Amino acid sequence: MAGARALGFKGCLKIGGSQIRNLLNAKDFFLFDCDGVIWHGEEAITGAPKVVSSLIKHGKNVFFVTNNCTRPRKNYVNKFYRLGFTGVMQEQIFSSSYCSALYLRDVAKVQGKVFVIGGEGVRNELLQAGISFVGDEDAPDGTIFNCALASDVKAVLVGHDDKFTFLKLAKASCYLRDPECLFLATDVDPWHPLQDGRILPGSGCLTAALEVATGRKAMVIGKPSPFMFECISSQFRVDPAQCLMVGDRLETDMLFGANCGLDTMLTLTGISQMKTAQEYRDSDHSTNQSFVPDYVVDTIADFLPAFED
Ligand SMILES: [Mg+2]
């Protein structure tokens, strides 16, 4: 168990005060996950709006990388303002739905239609990217025995869909019988916390259902895949060594940072707790080291004293 530390890996370093100040001085690019880091649903984390505006005021580059595909980026801009964040622009927001649209347009250069399992966020971003799509046209009593199948579907994109149906699953399975048809997932988040102990199943469940039905594996756009970072660095001059990835989920945010060669910070206002991070750090499985954050803070509000002179 001493393995990781004996090899000199840093991990789970709880920092405060001057250590945070030094880290903020050393980094030029700050990538924040959203839920559990800067807000909980419709409530900003105390101090988070000031942290973001202070970073921007000090000339830092701030980006938001979220697996939440349910809203288009323009709605995110509204949400930032609604929750008291000022100065956040659409160009700073990289959601899994936006990046999925970029992938289909710029990487896959898809010719034909995309069959969508997903909501407004996914559809709107596809529309903005000029990609034609199908997905919600069936009558309520439609079945896989009598529904129409489009002839030119070249990709299936799966995201969070609270109107997911057996018929959508069945149609997507039919399209994916064509090995040339791309199989893409916005993200594979398993679930999201709600209030009073309830949870919301995430996109990952829907993707898993389709993977079982087709025997195929989806290509994943969202964290921990590095593609969202590639989207950022294709639009901005970003040096990974100058980046800090701040998130609340070890298996997505910290792994994403590790996959992209970024320093990582876990904030304890969300899903993952210190104990789990330490268990990964102390584990004998070397793959678990990618889940270990370099730094840990209780909340990003701990940044605030660093901005005071
Ligand atoms: Mg989160």
Image (tube, helix red, strand yellow):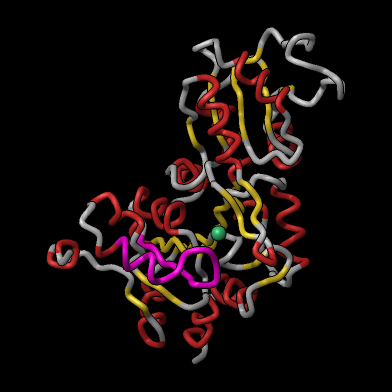
Residue drawn where x is 54% and y is 29% of the image = 184
State the residue lying farthest toward the front: 197
Q: Nearer the viewer, residue 109 or 179?
A: 179
User: On the rendered image, what quadrant is the N terminus found in?
Assistant: bottom left
User: Looking at the picture, does residue 166 appear above or below residue 46?
Assistant: above
**Is 151 rendered above or below residue 6?**
above
At x 31% / y 64%, what residue is drawn?
Answer: 279
The answer to whether residue 16 is magenta is: no
**Residue 111 in view here:** no
**Which of the pair 185/95 is nearer the observer?**
185
Segment colored magenta: 263-280
Residue at 63 percent of width and 74 percent of height: 45
Relative placement, left or right, of 162 versus 210 is right
In the rendered image, which quarter is residue 297 located in?
bottom left
Q: Position of residue 67 (x, y in %)?
A: 57, 48
Residue 211 visible to the viewer:
yes
Residue under the point 47% across and 64% down: 272
Q: Where does residue 127 sit, x and y in percent of width and height?
A: 73, 32
Residue 278 within the segment the image draws in magenta: yes
> In x, y percent, where is residue 227?
46, 40
* Numbered marks: total: 0
Q: Residue furthest bottom?
A: 309
Residue toward you, 60 or 79: 79
Of all residues shown, which one is farthest toward the left? 6
